[in-house]
């Protein structure tokens, strides 16, 4: 029997084995980088190919080139996790509509390299209205993210950090994804949908450690800008979140303290994930020290980190009494050289209301009954 003579259901099942999680999500803990680089051509704005590290398996792409039947069956899997540029949004939406793919898109990553607030209706509103994806990510410079949120940010110290990209990822329910947005009464992007999960990756602060009195520098940050601007949309977003991930490579402790002011507004939060150190096998520390000509006191970033752990634990204690937080995950336990100190620091502050799940897990869970037996770090 010829392969193509099998029923479409069987062929689709075979193709599904080539499916894979979003490569963007797999790299979410890394220093942010852009997977799309726009360039001018006779045809207008086009995009270079996405680097291999951001590619989904080539097998799906190759399968779409074999025949019409396999192309039709493969496209829904291939576009399950999509990447786009705002200036190519119309082409992207037309393609999805032409091939009836809208309902198959689960996540969308938008690379936003510039200011596009002149586009009407807003590109993000069109995207959310026409593609019912439950996950929406934006890769952009800090000032672009604050512009999308309709607030001002500090830019005087941005040069010291050289943060080309940061990541904002928001999740919604499938029901919420089908709620229409009124173009004539456009809401703030942050409350355009009842987002439930939020991930912020601010990138690396290492370069700023090379500047004089680095601790006085203001980190470019959507989170701190939302708090300082008393953003009503930001407060509404925070009050609805159930899960929040904060990723930043060696932020200053005073910046972490500012971020935690936003976290304390997340009274419905169930899960908090924090990562302040690079991945154990990451070369970002070495790369940025070389870029800075070696002018970094390597003790400074680690000291800032250790102070930040205590601040985080104090905020968890606050959300224990004032909120609904039930899980804390400190991803930095993966760095063996600091693991024990981190575990002891956090456990000593959380005390009897929280239990450390397992050594090396980095996960603390809230104990419903304060009188229950606790497990600490020796």
Image (tube, rainbow, N blue to C red):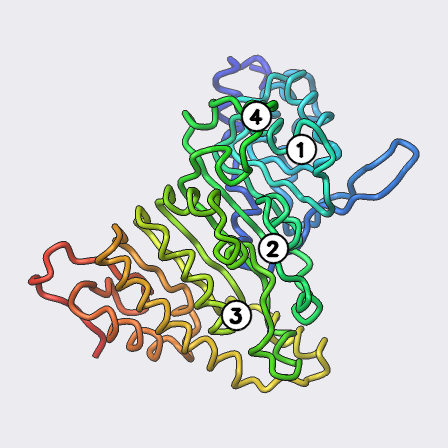
Q: Say which residue appears at 57% left-offset and 51% top-offset.
A: 167
Q: Which of marks 3 and 4 is nearer the N terminus?
A: 4
Q: Are marks 3 and 1 in contact (CB under 8 Å)?
A: no
Q: Do the residues labelled 2 and 1 touch (CB within 8 Å)?
A: no
Q: Earlier in the sequence, mark 4 or mark 1?
A: 1
Q: Mark 1 points at which residue?
A: 61
In the image, residue 322 sits, relative to residue 193, either above or below, namely below
Q: Which of marks 4 and 2 is nearer the N terminus?
A: 2
Label 2: how many Cα within 10 Å (few below 14, some 14–19, many 20+): many
Of residues 165 and 157, which is closer to you in this image? 157
Of residues 137 and 311, which is closer to you in this image? 311
Q: Which of marks 4 and 2 is in front?
A: 4
Q: Which of marks 3 and 4 is in front?
A: 4
Q: Which of marks 2 and 3 is nearer the N terminus?
A: 2
Of residues 218 and 308, which is closer to you in this image? 218
Q: Mark 4 points at which residue?
A: 185
- Structural distance between the alpha carbons of marks 2 and 1: 28 Å
Q: Mark 2 points at which residue?
A: 166
Q: Is mark 2 on a helix, strand or loop?
A: strand
Q: What element carries label 3?
A: loop
Determine the image quadrant of residue 371. bottom left
Q: Which of marks 3 and 1 is nearer the N terminus?
A: 1
Label 1: how many Cα within 10 Å (few below 14, some 14–19, many 20+): some
187 relative position to 159: left or right = left
Q: Do the residues labelled 2 and 3 touch (CB within 8 Å)?
A: no
Question: Seen from this angle, which residue lies furthest left?
Answer: 371
Q: Name the residue under label 3.
A: 251
The picture places residue 179, in percent across and down from the top left corner, at 47, 23
Q: Say which residue appears at 35% left-offset and 45% top-offset.
A: 242
């Amino acid at each position: 029997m010829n392969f193509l003579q099998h029923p479409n259901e069987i062929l689709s099942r075979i193709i599904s084995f080539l499916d894979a999680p979003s490569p963007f999500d797999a790299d979410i803990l890394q220093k942010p980088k852009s997977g799309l680089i726009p360039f001018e051509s006779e045809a207008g704005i086009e995009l270079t190919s996405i680097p291999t590290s951001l590619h989904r398996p080539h097998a799906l792409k190759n399968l779409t080139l074999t025949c019409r039947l396999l192309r039709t069956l493969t496209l829904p899997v291939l576009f399950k996790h999509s990447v786009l540029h705002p200036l190519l949004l119309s082409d992207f939406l037309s393609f999805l509509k032409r091939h009836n793919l809208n309902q198959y898109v689960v996540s969308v990553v938008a690379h936003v390299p510039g200011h596009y607030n002149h586009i009407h209706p807003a590109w993000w509103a069109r995207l959310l209205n026409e593609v019912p994806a439950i996950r929406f990510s934006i890769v952009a410079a800090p000032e672009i993210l604050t512009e999308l949120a309709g607030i001002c940010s500090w830019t005087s110290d941005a040069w010291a950090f050289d943060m080309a990209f940061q990541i904002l990822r928001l999740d919604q329910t499938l029901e919420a994804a089908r709620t229409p947005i009124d173009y004539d009464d456009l809401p703030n992007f942050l409350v355009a949908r009842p987002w439930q999960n939020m991930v912020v990756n601010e990138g690396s602060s290492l370069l700023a450690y090379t500047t004089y009195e680095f601790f006085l520098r203001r980190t470019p940050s959507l989170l701190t800008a939302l708090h300082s601007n008393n953003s009503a949309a930001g407060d509404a977003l925070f009050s609805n979140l159930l899960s929040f991930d904060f990723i930043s490579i060696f932020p200053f402790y005073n910046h972490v303290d500012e971020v935690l002011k936003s976290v304390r507004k997340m009274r419905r939060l169930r899960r908090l994930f924090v990562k302040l150190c690079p991945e154990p096998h990451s070369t970002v520390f070495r790369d940025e020290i070389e870029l800075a000509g070696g002018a970094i006191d390597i003790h400074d970033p680690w000291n800032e980190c250790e102070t930040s752990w205590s601040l985080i634990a104090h905020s968890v204690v606050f959300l224990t009494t004032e909120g609904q937080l039930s899980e804390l995950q400190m991803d930095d336990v993966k760095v063996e050289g600091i693991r024990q100190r981190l575990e002891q620091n956090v456990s000593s502050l959380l005390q009897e209301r929280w239990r450390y799940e397992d050594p090396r897990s980095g996960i603390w869970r809230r104990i419903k009954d304060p009188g229950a037996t606790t497990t600490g770090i020796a």
